[in-house]
Image (spheres, rainbow, N blue to C red):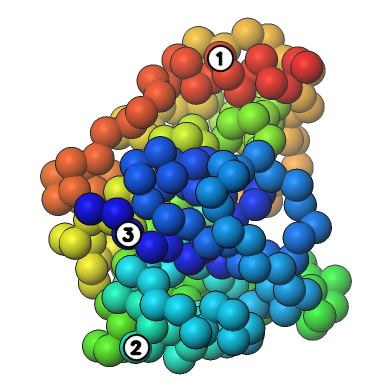
Amino acid sequence: MSMRFLLIGGTKFIGPHVVRQLVDQGHEATVYHRGQTEADLPKSVRHVLSPLAAMPVLSFPNEILAEPFDAVIHMIALGEADASAAMQAFQGRAQRLVVLSSGDVYRAYGRFMGTEPGPPELGLLHEESPLRSVLYPYRKQAPSPADWTYHYEKILVEREVLDDATLQGTVLRLPKVYGPGGNADLATVYSMRNQPQWRWTHGYVENVAAAIVLAATHPAAAGRVYNVGEEHTPTVAERLAGLPPSSVATDEGSPYNFAQDIAYDTQRIRTELGYKEVVSYEEGLRRTLESASQ
């Protein structure tokens, strides 16, 4: 059955893959953005352009609010303010709000960063793993309060979306994404060659997009949180064993605690929604490195 989707953002990196997959499945897509990024999107896609679509997105034009949508996919929610604005705007106008979150919500990430006390947490991170107690993980790095990193907090995004019974929410905690157009030099692998046993869950961009589309279209995803990423997270050494040499510099000065893995358990989305990768690990790497060499 064809559905009507609104994407907030959606013209960079992951977004175009989400839009194309929705259209390929027979759905209608409207993209709300600033118009500053040229994206290769199907001709059937409707564009609503406004400077108000800059992050954080706090308001929506009547052109959007006058129409009903089956689901809204918020690609660029930063924190409490914009997540709340989206919830208020689309109550009664959409059946579901899907937001992209991150594994940086977990307490283990705070222990990796050194902001959460305690020893490293062993094992995979599942959706019920403890979350950070210290909010705004990148605020100290923000050049000013006007910078988006100052307000970034996915924990608050999740709370806004999941705590409202009038608009169903779905949360997707994304891994480190790579592919043509983003992390294409695989620096997040090569630069960590001096941490051979460390594990960090990654995801090829088309596979991550497929997870987003599946969660947005599947009725069982309403009110649920899903980790997204590869089924098995290799160590850095295991990744490098299948990759060609690279000139990417080794990160010698990181203050992070590499005894703490950032490795997800991704079984929930696979079991509940039937998720499977659409591109193999090997093919995703090939496409990524090929794009970086062009």
Q: How crowded is mark 2: few (under 14 residues within 10 Å), some or many (20 or more)?
A: few
Label 2 sits on what residue type?
Answer: Gly
Label 3 sits on what residue type?
Answer: Met
**Residue beneath disc 2:** 92
Question: Is residue 123 visible to us here?
Answer: no
Q: Which of 27 and 185 is in front in this view?
A: 27
In the image: residue 120, left or right of residue 245: left
Ranked by sequence position, the earlier of labels 1 and 2 is 2
Location of the C terminus (image quadrant): top right
Tell me which corner region of the image, top left, top right, bottom left or bottom right, holds residue 60: bottom right
Return the x and y of residue 280 as percentages of the image width and height: 39, 20
Q: Is mark 1 on a helix, strand or loop?
A: helix
Q: Residue at x 79, y 82 (%)?
A: 145
Ranked by sequence position, the earlier of labels 3 and 2 is 3
Q: Which residue is drawn at 38% across and 58% down?
A: 172
Looking at the rendered image, the disc whose residue lies closer to the viewer, 1 or 3, is 3
Q: Count numbered badges in the picture.
A: 3
**Residue beneath disc 1:** 286
Q: What element carries label 2?
A: loop
**Residue beneath disc 3:** 3
Return the x and y of residue 252 as percentages of the image width and height: 74, 35
Q: Nearer the viewer, residue 173 or 51?
A: 51
Return the x and y of residue 240 as percentages of the image width and height: 55, 16
Looking at the rendered image, the disc whose residue lies closer to the viewer, 1 or 2, is 2
